[in-house]
Image (tube, grey):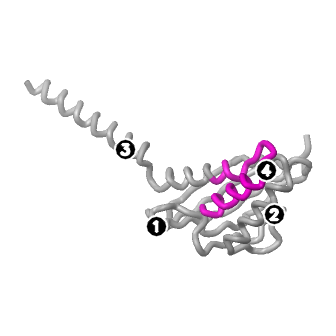
Amino acid sequence: MKRRAGGLILLLLTVMLVGVFAWRFWMGGDERAIEKVLWRGMELVNKDQQEGDLTAISRAGELAGLFTIPFTIQPLPNITGRAIADADELRAMVFRARSAVDRIDVEVLDLRLEVVTPGEEALMWIAVQGAFDGNPELSEAIERYRVRWRKTSGDWKIAEIEPADTIHVPKR
């Protein structure tokens, strides 16, 4: 009888652990929610074919919606010469960039995320490499950024982006 009770307790503990793991996996935590927003942002940035103005405007608007109000994008190497803190300006900049090229391919090479205050604020250090048609100089640079995230109205959004450094990869 003790053996059955021990087996039953072990089974219940296993089911509980699997349940907790499954809940964390599907419901996620702050990290999972932030990464989900990041990957959606990457989908919105990348472009693999010609697109109409309506699509470019829609993607630029959805991308701007991933930012808090207010937000700050510090001057970024090869992208902006000054800080951006206005959603309309961000939408216009993204629209112009998307309209100017046929292809944008930005890949995440490294990612570190630290939740500073659970449910409120997080910091991300990210390294990306971008390729744009007709501009090999950008495709050889690895850009590193610090991204500050804030949770507003139940959603994680980008509050600030600032450059960390740029590494130039030697030509092969």
> Could you tell me how far apart the alpha carbons at marks 3 and 4 are, in whole angstroms?
35 Å
Residue type highlighted by circle 4: Gly
Instruction: Give the residue pinned by disc 3.
Output: 23
Instruction: Give the residue pinned by disc 1.
Output: 153
> Could you tell me how far apart the alpha carbons at marks 1 and 2 are, in whole angstroms?
30 Å
Residue 4 image offset from top left, x and y in percent = 13, 25
**Is the C-beta separation of discs 4 and 1 under 8 Å?**
no
Which element is circle 1 on? loop
Which element is circle 2 on? loop
Q: Does label 2 or label 3 sit earlier along the sequence?
A: 3
Q: Does label 4 or label 2 sit earlier along the sequence?
A: 2
On screen, residue 135 versus residue 70, left or right, reads: right
Q: Does label 3 or label 1 sit earlier along the sequence?
A: 3
Residue type highlighted by circle 2: Ile
Q: Which mark is residue 130?
A: 4
> Could you tell me how far apart the alpha carbons at marks 4 and 2 are, in whole angstroms?
11 Å
Instruction: Give the residue pinned by disc 2.
Output: 79
On screen, residue 105 versus residue 122, left or right, reads: right
Q: Which residue sits at x=40%, y=46%?
A: 24
Point out the stretch of residues depicted in magenta.
Answer: 41-66
Residue type highlighted by circle 1: Ser
> Could you tell me how far apart the alpha carbons at marks 3 and 1 are, in whole angstroms?
22 Å
Magenta stretch, main secondary structure, is helix
Q: Which mark is residue 30?
A: none
Q: Which residue sits at x=79%, y=50%?
A: 130
Residue type highlighted by circle 3: Trp
Q: Nearer the viewer, mark 3 or mark 1?
A: 1
Q: Quadrant of the N terminus?
A: top left
Asked which quadrant contains residue 73, the reply is bottom right
On screen, residue 88 versus residue 130, left or right, reads: left
Asked which quadrant contains residue 144, the reply is bottom right
Is 91 rendered above or below residue 134?
Answer: below
